[in-house]
Image (spheres, rainbow, N blue to C red):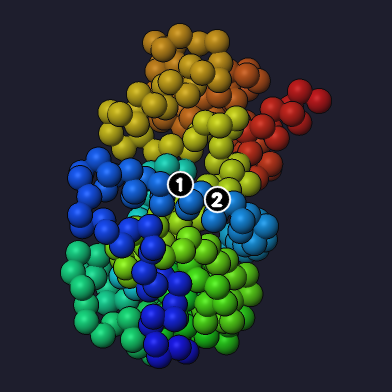
Amino acid sequence: MPKDLSLLMTEQQNINTLHIDEMDTIDILNTINHEDQNVALAVENELAAISRAVDAIYQKVACGGRLIYIGAGTSGRLGVLDASECPPTYGVSPTLVQGIIAGGPNALQNAIEGAEDSQELAKEDLEKIGLTEHDVVCGLAASGRTPYVIGGLEYANLIGATTLSICCVNNGVISDYAQYPIEVKVGPEVITGSTRMKAGTAQKMVLNMLSTSVMIKLGKVYGNLMIDVQPANEKLKDRAIGIVENCTELSSIEAKKLLETTRYDVKCAILIEKTGLDFESCRDLLLKYQNNVAKVIRQYKK
């Protein structure tokens, strides 16, 4: 592990921002925006690696495994964020995708000194959630060298779990501990070492791709609509009504009435309208065809 942080790409000075402290507001913003435009291109360069990771995650999750993000600081917070948004968006259990951050929940708002330096702490955190060989552990570290993440990946490999990693440097140390390494090389930050910026954006983009792609493959999306949305508030109820309306020829009032009969089960509401079957029959067909609405419709029409 390199002791000299200046050798890391994420810690080098950006020649394009050497005089950012002397710029007017609009020039500061233009400079940041220009640097951010390079992030998507850096992610594009890793699409093949990201694709392999998605397929590996899906293989485990489809068989009952879980996806566990583990990281420290900004990287850890991004993992927790992505995990926490999966249940309301896709109707999955809160345990299916989990985010673990060095230092625990308190670290989401406060810096917990020394937590990221402990490899043993990561092992303890993974043991607490009962990690098994059926699960996937995704290590997140912009610098590619965080001891906490390395410890988590080491333990995951030891028990036979699938491992992947996301970092923003070339030849990151955590890549050596992951079966599916992803290295999004975004270059030096606008503010030297502030990896909450380009590196954070890159990690967020990759996490979006991982979880979204897996959910699509799990049948959580019909067309491009999130049909497992959980109507936990009025906004989400309105979204559910709009989805049913969009997928059928029903009016908004009719869609709402249908959803009320299915207890706001969007998938069954769509299937009832498209197939003419009752609620229980639609539920049975969803179980038979891996909760995939498109598959049920195709098979039923045959």
Whether the residues at callouts 1 and 2 have beta carbons within 8 Å, the answer is yes
Graded by Cα atoms within 10 Å as few (under 14), some (14 to 19) or many (20 or more), the crowding at tag 2 reads some
As helix, strand or loop, the secondary structure at mark 1 comes to helix
Image quarter in which the C terminus is found: top right
Residue 233 placed where, x, y %?
A: 28, 34
Quarter location, residue 171 = bottom right
Q: From what the image shows, is residue 97 above or below residue 289?
A: below
Please name the amino acid that badge 2 sits on. Answer: Leu
Residue, x 56% and y 16% (percent of image)? 248
Residue 135 placed where, x, y %?
A: 55, 70
Query: Taking the image as drawn, is residue 135 in sight?
Result: no
The residue indicated by pointer 2 is 41
Q: From what the image shows, is residue 193 above or below residue 41?
A: below
As helix, strand or loop, the secondary structure at mark 2 comes to helix
Picture mark count? 2
The tag on residue 37 is 1
Residue, x 42% and y 27% (percent of image)? 240
Residue 88 placed where, x, y %?
A: 38, 44
Between 291 and 146, which is closer to the camera in this rendering?
146
How far apart are labels 1 and 2 at the CA level? 7 Å
Quarter location, residue 271 = top right
Query: Taking the image as drawn, is residue 212 in sight?
Result: yes
Between 217 and 3, which is closer to the camera in this rendering?
3
Is 236 situated left or right of 7 in this image?
left
Q: From what the image shows, is residue 57 above or below residue 257?
A: below
Is 218 situated left or right of 15 in this image?
right
Residue 215 placed where, x, y %?
A: 55, 47
Graded by Cα atoms within 10 Å as few (under 14), some (14 to 19) or many (20 or more), the crowding at tag 1 reads few
Residue, x 20% and y 44% (percent of image)? 25
Please name the amino acid that badge 1 sits on. Answer: Gln
Residue, x 57% and y 66% (percent of image)? 182
Quarter location, residue 146 = bottom left
